[in-house]
Image (cartoon, helix red, strand yellow):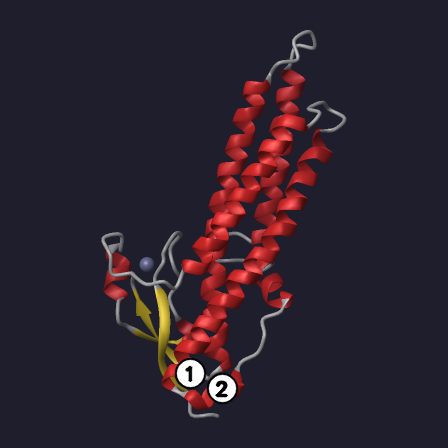
Amino acid sequence: MSGIYRHADQGLKRLYRYVESQFQNTALTAQWDELNVLRTVSDLYQRIDDFSREEYMTIARKAYADARDEILALLPEKEGSFTDLDTLFLINIYTRYDRKTEYRYDHEWERKRDRLAESMMAVIQAQDAAKISNTNEIRVALQRALNLMERQMRQMADTMTDEARNQAFADAGVDQVMWNTQRDAGVCPGCQARDGQIYPLYAVPGKHRGCRCYLTPARFGLTP
Ligand SMILES: [Zn+2]
């Protein structure tokens, strides 16, 4: 069991806490009527998006630092190769189409937000004006949106970790990497077959959803 994803797990704990409190506050305080529903949902998603970007940057910077330390333990002369990750790094991941998960993070986020707004609108419109207590249906719709959001966040936290490590490898001139499984009971047969395999850094097979295999440096290029 490797600690590669511990920063992701710590970040997710903070994210989930924030997200759950935001959803809870919204459920308790929002005016669920046709006039306010769109703004309520879009404000909720905006606050969470702002908060989560910070958290993803923290995860990425820590994962990058881990990879840097692993490389320096092998080759101390690589000291000057590293840079600081900036928000461009994050934006690139947000806006890149992922052929494995088949989505762009930012598009998926907007799609989920719009879907929540639509289902809230449907709940409100179906309501009998005489009895305003449809709180159970509202709670169910919010809970569903919350679960989907947390799943997307988990995928993103792992992606940030993998991408930050790859960036550190590229910065240090690593040109071949080794595939490592977590070596626990959760490893699937497909990943098991890759354990210990060496790949060029730019031709590593894609990971399936939820895969926590990780790469370690296997060879440095000849260029300084
Ligand atoms: Zn795997």
Image coordinates for residue 149, horizontal then vertical, percent: 53, 42
| Label drawn at residue 195 | none
Q: Is residue 73 found left or right of 91 in the rendered image?
A: left
Image coordinates for residue 58, horizontal then vertical, percent: 55, 62
* Ligand 1 position by quadrant: bottom left
Q: Tell me the CA gap for discs 2 and 1.
A: 7 Å
Residue labelled with disc 1: 72
The kind of secondary structure element at disc 2 is helix
Q: Residues within 10 Å of mark 2 (few under 14, many from 20)?
A: few
Residue labelled with disc 2: 79
Whether residue 144 appears in this view of the structure is yes
Q: Residue at x 47, y 67 (%)?
A: 63
Please state, as top left, top right, bottom left or bottom right, where the N terminus lies in the image: bottom left
The kind of secondary structure element at disc 1 is helix
Whether residue 100 appears in this view of the structure is no
Three-letter code for the amino acid on which mark 2 is drawn: Glu
In this view, the residue farthest toward the top is 130
Q: Is residue 49 found left or right of 180 in the rendered image?
A: right
Question: Are the residues flagged by discs 2 and 1 in contact, CB closer than 8 Å?
Answer: yes
Three-letter code for the amino acid on which mark 1 is drawn: Leu
Q: Residue at x 48, y 50 (%)?
A: 12
Image coordinates for residue 138, horizontal then vertical, percent: 58, 24
Q: Residue at x 65, y 9 (%)?
A: 131
Q: Residues within 10 Å of mark 1 (few under 14, many from 20)?
A: some
Q: Earlier in the sequence, mark 2 or mark 1?
A: 1
Q: Residue at x 46, y 77 (%)?
A: 68
Q: Which residue occupies the foreground of this view, 188 or 217?
A: 217
Q: Is residue 210 found left or right of 125 in the rendered image?
A: left
Q: Is residue 153 above or below residue 190?
A: above
In this view, the residue farthest toward the right is 35
